[in-house]
Amino acid sequence: MSDTSNILLCTPPMSPAAEDSCMELLTPPAETELNVLWVAYSRTPDSCLTQWRQHGTTQPNDISIINVGDSVRSAVAANGASHGGPGPIQTVPSAGDLTGLGIAISNVLSQWAETDAQTVVCFDSLTALLQYVEPEKSYEFLHVLTGRLFAADAIAHFHISPDAHDDQTVEMIRSLFDGEVSITEDSDRIVLTR
């Protein structure tokens, strides 16, 4: 998948293989210096950092976490991060605030634009995003975002649980990506590129 920049990671809910695949996508083998961006809808910054520490093979050049939605308040309070400000942990309090989320992601990408490190992105998850935003609006947002990530030479993957959505929504979202990794119920991994 070395020539793909935006990858859809399709996993069943609570799949044990999802975390391993996520980490493989966050640590491309050819790169040594990484800037890591997590967009977390259903996770805390601590869980993202713990996952990296447990599975990451190198210390990232830089790391930033954008925590989105209701779980943000408790995570921010626990970490002492400023609400919505710049820094390694940023917040977007409303899960449906696509403008705020887009600005936060663009700010991180702009900060890293002049570095030599490879930017890698984990968007966890589209399933959570689609709980708050209509599919058509989500599609428009993701169309712009995937273009922005491509322009920034980032390697990004986006988690989704296809069984949580109707087929039409999944196919519409799938059309935005140039690669796909699907994890089956038996934890088999299927890689597809377009």
Image: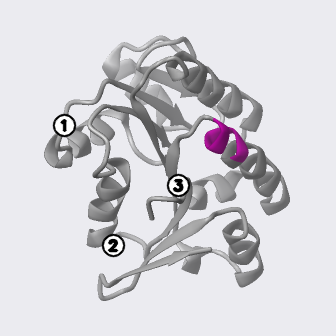
Q: Depth check: 24 or 172 in front?
A: 24
Q: Where is residue 122 in the image (x, y as percent from the top left)?
A: 46, 47
Which residue corresponds to mark 2?
15
Which numbered mark, 2 or 1, is in the foreground of this view?
A: 1
Which residue corresponds to mark 1?
58
Q: In the image, which residues are magenta?
A: 147-151
The answer to if 27 sits in the magenta stretch is no
Q: Position of residue 167 (x, y in %)?
A: 71, 83
Q: Colour scheme in the image?
A: one colour
Above or below for 62 versus 101: above
Q: Is the magenta stretch mostly helix, strand or loop?
A: helix
Residue occupying the point 70% across, 43% down: 145
Residues at discs 2 and 1 in contact (Cβ within 8 Å): no
| Quarter of the image where the N terminus is located | bottom left
Q: Which of the labelled discs sits on residue 125, or is there none? A: 3
Above or below for 142 versus 186: above
Left or right placement of residue 173 versus residue 188 in this view: right
Element assignment for label 1: loop
